[in-house]
Amino acid sequence: MRAWSLISVLSVVAGAGLVMGACSSDDTNTSVGGGSTTSSGTGNAGGQGGDGASGGSSGTAGGGAVGGSSGTAGGGAAGGSSGTGGAGGAGGGGTPCESSDCATCMLSQCATDYCAAEIQVCQANQDCADLYGCITACPNQTCADGCHQLYPGGVTDLYAMTNCAACDSMTCAQDCAPACPLTAPTPTSCDVANCDTCTASQCALDTCALPLQICQANVNCTALYNCITGCTDQICENSCHVQHQDGIVDLYAAYDCLACHPAACSQDCSSICPITAPTVVGCNVGDCTTCANSQCAAAVCATEVATCQANQACVNLYQCYQNCSTPGCFNVCDNLFPAGLTDLNAMYACMMCSPTTCSIDCATSCN
């Protein structure tokens, strides 16, 4: 039932803690029936029958013999004179974990102990653990549904664990009745036969809510996105990558989710999948002059450029160089504006020879 799929049960009903969070220790201390046997479930307590078993007038063991079924303790309590409940006092294997509230019941030590084996199986299955973590972190149902397609190897074990906690007759079957049985959602996607339309759809945005939130929380990721969307060529995009390197991983994780997640647009965008983060190779474009004069190099070396601009001798020296084509001419410029040499050389070194600018394109000039 979609309204009670895992995201609802784990995050809303059970407060996203459920059993894995409550049972991370190895202390199982299990006993069939959910933890510790109570006085109402043991034969001895039932046999005594409290005050109701004494007196012998009715021959019944009051309400104390069986967990409230008939009070006759299987015949053992009849006879009025002794009032001992014999073996008939057992409570049918234990007492369920019901608490009149599904979330409280599922999070109880009783349910945790009873489902210890299922919990351990899920914890030992990385796909199950990842699926659990993915679902409980999702902010919406579409995102949670998509988790199942990312970690299909964990579906069986996760649902065995959650069905044990929520739907087993010895745990919370009554409290969680509207949710039971829990079943995995039917795989769906956002594909609409057009990659751009699909990745911009609300369906894809909801499916990829987690990586999008991670990017939005990273100032470098949002800056990189804004920078790239303003570009019209690869040189510009390379410049963006160089300027905002700390946002690359998060941005391309979001891109890959929108285009290539099986629950998003993997069919419509199959020709560009997978989308991987680019390796930053500076501003190199295959030509030293083009690279050194690019916006990319200027952006990376903004500090050195600003220092030169603040030094009139550096500005004059730079302008003098623009009219030169021979070593002799450059030497004349150096002699005319010696106070600008240090700052201009620092700017050129950054724009031409730095690994984050044009060190590949200008390798022969930098050696």
Image: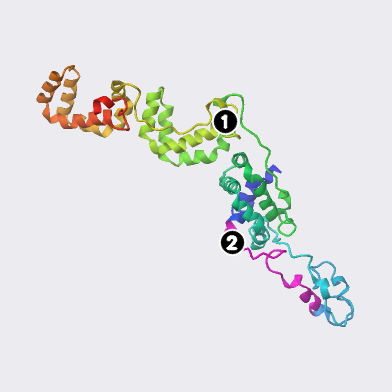
Discs 1/2, front: 2
- Rendered location of residue 20, percent (x, y): 60, 55
Please tell me whether mark 1 sits on a helix, a strand or a loop.
loop
Please tell me whether mark 2 sits on a helix, a strand or a loop.
loop
Mark 2: give few (<14), some (14-19) or many (20+) Cα within 10 Å. Answer: few
Name the residue located 60 percent from the left edge and 64 percent from the top edge: 27
Q: Is residue 269 left or right of residue 115?
A: left
State the mark number for residue 26: 2
Q: Is residue 323 left or right of residue 92?
A: left
Cα distance between the residues tagged 1 and 2: 45 Å
- Rendered location of residue 212, percent (x, y): 50, 38
Q: Is residue 227 left or right of residue 30?
A: left
In the rendered image, residue 152 lying in the magenta stretch gets the answer: no
Residue ID for mark 1: 201
Residue 262 seen in this snapshot: yes
Region rendered in magenta: 21-50
Q: Quadrant of the C terminus?
A: top left
Q: Quadrant of the N terminus?
A: top right
